[in-house]
Image (tube, rainbow, N blue to C red):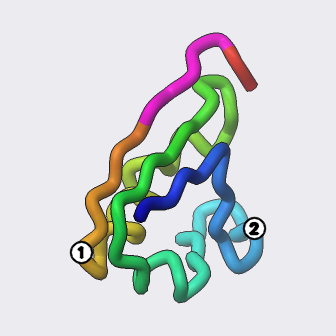
Amino acid sequence: MGLILINPNLYIKTPLPGLEAEYWPEASNINMSITVIQSELSPWKLNIVKLSQQLSQAGSDVFTQLITGVR
């Protein structure tokens, strides 16, 4: 069993400039293989490492794939 996320935004709400984003609690409680497919030109791409860290907190194996030239 696994989970595929396409251009995910797992923030509770958009953070104010300069503040850390808060992720939905479920993002750090998942334990399964997860693939994040992210468009290269999306503003969410900048946070893919932090998102991967959140998703792996409960033991998930997280894989990321960028789709180049796509927003």
When asked about the image quadrant of residue 16, the answer is bottom right
Mark with earlier residue (1, 2): 2
Q: Nearer the viewer, mark 1 or mark 2?
A: 1
Q: Please identify the dominant SS of the magenta region.
A: strand
Q: Residue sitting at 24 percent across and 74 percent down?
A: 59
- Please give left or right for residue 17 compared with residue 56 in the image: right
Looking at the rendered image, the quarter that the C terminus falls into is top right
What is the number of the mark on residue 14? 2
| Image: magenta residue range | 65-69
Residue 6 image offset from top left, x and y in percent: 64, 45
The structure residue drawn at horizontal position 66% and vertical position 45%, both measured from the top left corner, is 7
Residue 26, horizontal then vertical, whole percent:
53, 84
The picture places residue 23, in percent across and down from the top left corner, at 57, 76
Q: Is 33 positioned to the left or the right of 19 in the image?
A: left
Q: Quadrant of residue 22?
A: bottom right
**Disc number placed over residue 49 in the picture, else none:** none
Question: Mark 1 = which residue?
Answer: 59
Dot 1 lies on which element? Answer: loop
